[in-house]
Image (cartoon, rainbow, N blue to C red):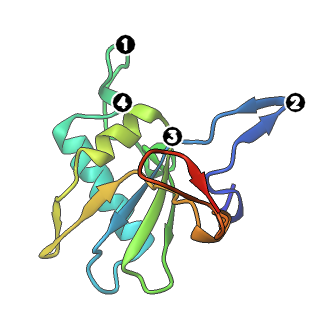
């Protein structure tokens, strides 16, 4: 994978699959690295016994090795204030999002799902709606 394909549907053998679960983490402590964030969040998931490892039907035994942990990839912004995470499962994404407002090194992390806003340039400038819903030019 990689940042270039982040958020894009995968095409496996001609079958389009949904994109992997992704979340953002904002308000990172200064100089936090991707591995530090990953270790911190995966440790919290382990301690709280949440995520796919602890879902009904899983063995839930032992600590997950980092290579098989719930966080598949982690990218930090250029400023280091925000990270984007790719999770292995939807359950793992929900588990990490449930950690919203957890404190890491005296910084309250804000964790959520990325949203995409429609750029204003995509809305024709000459088109507007009146109060009754009819178009005007």
Decide: few, some or many residues near mark 4? Use Cα within 10 Å; few <14, some 14-19, many ≥20. many
Residue 82's quadrant in the figure? Answer: bottom left
The label shown at residue 88 is 3
Residue 54's quadrant in the figure? Answer: top left
User: Can you say which quadrant of the picture contains the C terminus?
Assistant: bottom right
Q: Residue furthest right?
A: 14
To which residue does mark 4 refer? Answer: 53
Callout 3 touching callout 1 (CB < 8 Å): no
To which residue does mark 2 refer? Answer: 14
Q: Earlier in the sequence, mark 3 or mark 1?
A: 1
Callout 2 touching callout 3 (CB < 8 Å): no
Q: Earlier in the sequence, mark 2 or mark 4?
A: 2
User: Can you say which quadrant of the picture contains the N terminus?
Assistant: bottom right
Decide: few, some or many residues near mark 2? Use Cα within 10 Å; few <14, some 14-19, many ≥20. few
Q: Earlier in the sequence, mark 3 or mark 4?
A: 4
Q: Position of residue 111 (x, y in %)?
A: 30, 57
Callout 2 touching callout 4 (CB < 8 Å): no
Report the mark closest to the observer, 3 or 4. Answer: 3
Residue placed at 49% from the left, 45% from the top? 133
Q: Position of residue 29 (x, y in %)?
A: 26, 79
Residue placed at 67% from the left, 61% from the top? 2
Secondary structure of the residue carrying numbered label 2: loop
Cα separation, mark 2 vs mark 3, equals 21 Å
């Amino acid at each position: 994978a990689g940042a270039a394909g982040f958020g894009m549907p995968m095409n496996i053998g001609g079958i389009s699959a949904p994109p992997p679960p992704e979340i953002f983490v904002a308000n990172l402590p200064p100089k936090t690295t991707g591995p530090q964030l990953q270790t911190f969040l995966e440790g919290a998931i382990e301690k709280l016994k949440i995520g796919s490892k602890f879902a009904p039907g899983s063995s839930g035994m032992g600590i997950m090795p980092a290579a098989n942990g719930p966080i598949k990839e982690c990218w930090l912004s250029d400023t280091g204030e925000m990270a984007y995470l790719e999770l292995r499962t939807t359950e793992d994404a929900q588990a990490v999002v449930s950690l919203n407002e957890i404190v890491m090194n005296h910084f309250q992390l804000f964790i959520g799902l990325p949203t995409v806003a429609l750029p204003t340039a995509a809305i024709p400038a000459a088109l507007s709606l009146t109060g009754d819903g009819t178009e005007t030019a």
